[in-house]
Amino acid sequence: MDPVCHTLVGASLAESGLKRRTALGTATLLLAANLPDIDVLAYAYGPVSALWFRRGVTHGVLAWLLLPLLLTLGVLAWDRIVRRRGSRTPTEPVIWPQVLFLAFVGVASHPLLDLLNTYGIRLLMPFSDRWFYGDTLFILDPWVWAILGAGIWIARQGRRTTRSAVVALLTLGTYVGIMAVSNVIARRDVTETLEASGVGRPERMMVAPVAVNPFERWVVVQIGDDYRFGWYHWLRSERLDLIPLVLSPEPADYRATAATRGPSARMFLSWARFPYYEVGEGGEGTVVYIGDARYTLDPVGSWASVRIDLGAR
C-alpha cells in the first residue's frame, strides 16, 4: 500500500489506545508502520534495481523481528539524548518493553497491508525470493483513506475517545474481508466463463482491484502460450468483458531471448508477474521492451517495463 495508508494505520492504532502504553507511543507506531519502506533507498541505483530489491528483505519474516528491535533502540536513544535533555520539567517515562511491543505491531501492519495488493511482497525473504500476491486492494485506495481518516479525526475531537479509531480499524477489516471474498468469487466466475466460452482453462490468473471502483476488476489470464485480458464488472449481467488483445509470455524471437540475458532484464524478470516482449528498431539498432501486463499493455515509456538496447548486431 501507499505511505498515506501506512501512516493512517499507524495513527489509527495509536488513537485506539495503544499510544497510552508509553511516552513516544504515537511516534513509535507511526515510524514502525512505515519503516519497512526504507528499501525505497534502492531508487538511488535506478528504477530497475528498485523493482528487483523492493518488497523483499525489509518486508520478509526476518525483518519482522529485526526492524522492531532497531526502532526500539532508536526511540530509546532519542529519549535519552534529545527528549530528556531538552526538557526542563519532568517528562512521562518511556517504557522500553511497551516501545518494543508497539514497534512489533506497527512493523507487522506494513507487510500485511502490502500483501493485499497486486504488487505483492516476498514474504519469506531472505530465505526465499518467492512473491506472494493478495489481489485484494488497489495500491492507492481512497476508501481506506476515508475510513481511517474519519476514525482518527473523530478520535481527536471532544473527549478524545478511542472508540472511533477502533471502529475504523474494524470497518477496514470488514472492507478488506469483503474485497477478498469477492476476489475469490470473481476468479471462480472468470474460470467458468472462459471454459464455457471455449477460450480455455486459465493456468495463471490475476483478478485485480482498480482505483476508486470496488465493483470492477482488471483481469489477466494465461491460457497455454497466450495472455488474455479483460474487465470484470460486478454490476453487469455479463460480468466478463474480454478485450481483443493477445500477448505471449515467451520471447518472440532470438533478439528478445538475447535481451533476457542482460542484468537489467534479469532484475526486471525477477519482479515481473506477467512478462511479455516487444521488439522494435531504435536509433542505433534493435530495441527490446519487456513489460509486465499487470500494469501496462504498452511497455514503451512505462514504469512497469525495461528497455534493452541490443545495438546494430
Image: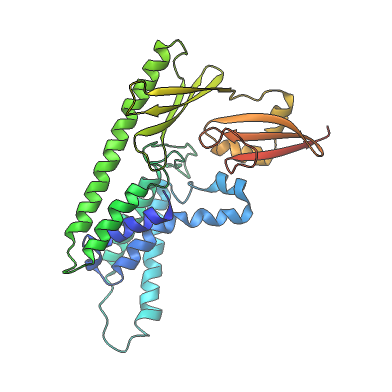
Q: Position of residue 140 (x, y in %)?
A: 42, 47
Quadrant in the rendering for residue 208: top left
Quarter in which the C terminus is drawn: top right
Q: Please, is residue 239 above or below residue 127 in the view?
A: above
Question: Can I make out residue 101 in this image?
Answer: no
Q: Position of residue 212 (x, y in %)?
A: 38, 43
Apparent side of residue 270 relative to residue 309 in the rendered image (left or right): left
Q: Nearer the viewer, residue 243 or 122?
A: 243
Q: Residue furthest front?
A: 236
Residue at the (50%, 39%) spot, across then down = 129
What number of labels is visible? 0
Residue at the (39%, 62%) spot, across then down = 31
Q: Nearer the viewer, residue 96 or 293?
A: 293
Residue at the (39%, 64%) spot, across then down = 71
Question: Can I make out residue 51 in this image?
Answer: yes
Q: Nearer the viewer, residue 276 or 260?
A: 276
Q: Position of residue 226 (x, y in %)?
A: 55, 20
Quadrant in the rendering for residue 48: top right
